[in-house]
Amino acid sequence: MATEIDIEKTRGDTRRHIFLVKDKAGSVVDISAWTIFKLTITSIKAPPDATTLEEVMSGSLVTDGSDGRVGYTPAGTLDIGKHFYDTEALDENSELITFAEGEYVVTQDRGK
């Protein structure tokens, strides 16, 4: 089961999102052997197909992966409003795992 984490960012911001992967007991997971990290943003929750896809970010390990941290850098081009995301990877057995999901809210910046 994926951890529910809501994200809020200001329109145009491109600061990296860093996730810390933990198991059910709260221990950090070594993700050094994981591959193909992907964060997908859609306009609706639980989309039936790819027609609501708004952005896909490729992730990379922040260090060597033993600390469970992976980062994703947004393009900064999403429209203001509520979107939805999930983030997934292939684990050390090449099995797909979704480890975080939630709302992805983009707010108006004051300068525009």
Image (cartoon, helix red, strand yellow):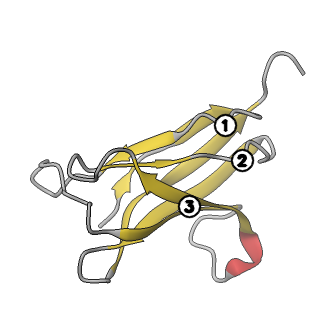
Q: Is residue 14 above or below residue 49?
A: above
Earlier in the chain: of badge 2 and badge 1, it is 1
The answer to which of 23 and 29 lies nearer the viewer is 29
Q: Residue 13: horizontal and vertical position, in percent?
A: 70, 32
Q: Secondary structure beneath disc 1?
A: loop
Looking at the rendered structure, the kind of residue marked 3 is Ser
Q: Which disc number belongs to residue 14? A: 1
Q: Quadrant of the C terminus?
A: top right
Question: Residue 100 sits in which quadrant?
Answer: bottom left
Q: Secondary structure beneath disc 3?
A: strand
Question: Is residue 58 shown left or right of residue 52?
Answer: left
- For residue 45, what is the image quadrant? bottom right
The local secondary structure at tag 2 comes to loop
| Alpha carbon separation for disc pair 1 and 3 | 14 Å
Q: Is residue 38 left or right of residue 107?
A: left
In the drawing, what numbered circle is on residue 75?
Answer: 2
Residue 27, disc: none
- Is 97 on the left or on the right of 112, as rendered? left
Q: Residue at x 42, y 46 (%)?
A: 5
Q: How dense is the environment of label 3, judged by Cα within 10 Å: few (below 14), some, or many (20 and up)?
A: some
The answer to which of 52 and 22 lies nearer the viewer is 22
Residue 76 place in picture, x, y as percent: 74, 42
- Sequence-first disc among 1 and 3: 1
Residue occupying image coordinates x 47% and y 61%: 87
- Marks 2 and 1 close (CB-CB < 8 Å): yes
Three-letter amino acid code of the residue under disc 1: Thr
Please say if 45 is above or below 93.
above
Give the position of the N terminus as an image quadrant. bottom left
Residue type marked 2: Ala
**Residue under circle 3?**
58
Give the alpha-carbon distance from disc 3 to disc 2, as whole Å. Answer: 11 Å
Q: Residue at x 78, y 23 (%)?
A: 109
